[in-house]
Amino acid sequence: MRKINLAIVGCGIVAKEHHYPALNKLKEKYNVVAVNSKTRRNAEKFSDMFENHPKVFDTYDDLLDWGEFDAVDLALPTEYNVEFVQKALINNKSVFCEKPIAINTNEAKKILGMSALSSSVVYIAENFRHISAHYRIRKIIDSGKIGKLQFIIWKQLIGMKNDNKYVETIWRKKPKHIGGFLSDGGVHHIAAIRIFMGEIESVYAKTKKISDYLGGDDTLFMTMNFKEGYIGSYTVSYALGDGRIKIDIYGDSGSIKIRKNYFIVETEKEKLTYKIPRESSFANEFLDFYRVFNGAANIMGDPLEAIKDLAVIEAGVSSSVKGKEVAIKNFL
Amino acid sequence: MRKINLAIVGCGIVAKEHHYPALNKLKEKYNVVAVNSKTRRNAEKFSDMFENHPKVFDTYDDLLDWGEFDAVDLALPTEYNVEFVQKALINNKSVFCEKPIAINTNEAKKILGMSALSSSVVYIAENFRHISAHYRIRKIIDSGKIGKLQFIIWKQLIGMKNDNKYVETIWRKKPKHIGGFLSDGGVHHIAAIRIFMGEIESVYAKTKKISDYLGGDDTLFMTMNFKEGYIGSYTVSYALGDGRIKIDIYGDSGSIKIRKNYFIVETEKEKLTYKIPRESSFANEFLDFYRVFNGAANIMGDPLEAIKDLAVIEAGVSSSVKGKEVAIKNFL
């Protein structure tokens, strides 16, 4: 398999705190050869983090004109994704692009269209699809251990403070992506919910704006109706709460309770606690992109998967406005 | 104030386990002078529990013909409430009647009508309106301690087994009351929610039948929209779960977390745990009925309050069938 020469575009929190350490673990698979940011100073500082000091480009166009790389890693404000993906594909570069795929599903479909036409890879990076515990849980469900699957209750009151680094990001303060934090964080959660429970058919939701610093609605109470007849509630607040995550999945003869670092599988016979292993979901996704770039099928990075995650949140936001249940297929 | 001569009609679980001990504490306020049950043997056994061995009547009509009492205590399968209330009022007897008020809000309105016409008291006994901690919590909310009220999350996975004594009750196995356990238990919860958060304007819900022994749908996932703009989720399953109750109420600067025996009030400054005092909510409601019988206003036993509780559950059941948000006012 061929090593990837990568150009990183966008040098914000995600690039520095997640992509950099992940790529550091994958030096045999990636050369980071160039970086580009809105401000040169940020790009230079980011370049200095790497041993090989990747080339710094003032603009994305300059980077593409230079062209001595295989793929771009787009770690940008969501609103730029469509344009930046397009330019990369025009220049025959493959794309590794951070979630959410786009500011809404309509925009996201442009990426889907480009991806269908291009021979380059378009990979939407959703790290919740690269957490091995999620598949382990799905396997336990599929094994029938907890009986016939019935419902999921996802409760996560995140309570982001005013000085949270994500909150302080300018593009998050005035979000163009639908629902602001509701989609920014929400697509992660929906990705996991879809792994556990399969596809969602319709939702009903109420959103609320509680804080004055989160750039839009920050609280979502949603009921989900799954294709297979399961039901679920997804309750999230970025404004309020203690940050604890509680996910309860019930089958008719057992349950799986997922917490931060562990999950408990309980049946009438036994109660087993499983540690959630420490792993880098970001390294996992770069590893998967490496395989896809070298010819493997693009399953976890398929833009359609990313659209399906976003569609559920968009349907929730739409439901809250309309005061009625909304079908997901309207957004696919 | 005048002592009440009481005839107890229905000698099932509630009469034996809740009304009997409550009345035992209120011997200065109540004489239990007669009992009546569908089967004479049950009524005799129940009469034997009392020191004074109240008279046993084979039928409700016989009891009413005898007539030497002030009020009936109706602890009956819900489907009989309307008829039994009517007969009591025709005989100028006051009524203390167990919740749910009736099998649905349409039927309940007959009781409301009778109550409006009669000079006797019609008191619907909802013991969740007689738990002092509920009012203490409301007071804390009203004090502004947790800031502007935002939402409530009520999660109670009750997990009733096949051999649960309530499950084994024949009239609960083939429920005529709407939603079966969903309303039987649900009116309690809605009564508490209304104390905490005020009136509910509309709901969206999904119900599910998971067990084969609970006589109808046994699981309800509901989103509530409150008149004052608050939102809430109410997630209950009588089929599955560990029985634990978790109620979280959030204001924009604090929270109240209610568990079985205690509640925690948390703000940025402090975290205080309050014990929920052991008390008999049933004794409290009989004490209140005693006051109302002697001329006090009927606030907590007002049939309209009971209808409001039932209307929310009925709206939830209706919402699940229709797949859309339903306004509570349709049922009032």
Image (spheres, coloured by chain):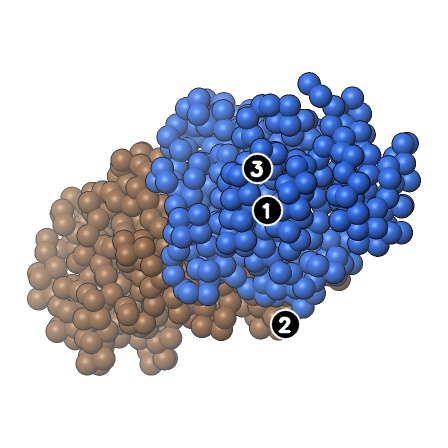
Chain colours: A brown, B blue
Q: Residue at x 74, y 23 (%)?
A: B3
The image quadrant where one finds the C terminus of chain A is bottom left
Same chain letter for marks 2 and 1: no
Which residue carries the number 1 mark?
B101
Which residue carries the number 2 mark?
A144
Q: Taking A283 as reference, is B41 above or below it?
A: above
- Whether residues under marks 2 and 3 lie with C-beta atoms below 8 angstroms apart, the answer is no
Q: CA distance from mark 1 to mark 3?
A: 17 Å
- Mark drawn on residue A132: none
Q: Is residue A191 left or right of residue B239?
A: left
Q: Is residue A10 visible?
A: no
Q: Is residue B303 left or right of residue A146?
A: left
Residue B324: image location, x then y, percent: 38, 61
For this rendering, which residue is in front, B120 or B173?
Answer: B120
User: Which amino acid type corresponds to the residue marked 2 in the rendered image?
Assistant: Gly
Q: Residues within 10 Å of mark 3 (few under 14, many from 20)?
A: some
Same chain letter for marks 1 and 3: yes
For this rendering, which residue is in front, B155 or A173?
Answer: B155
User: Which amino acid type corresponds to the residue marked 3 in the rendered image?
Assistant: Ser
Q: CA distance from mark 2 to mark 3?
A: 58 Å
**Mark 2 chain:** A
Q: Is residue B172 left or right of residue B305?
A: right
Which residue carries the number 3 mark?
B118
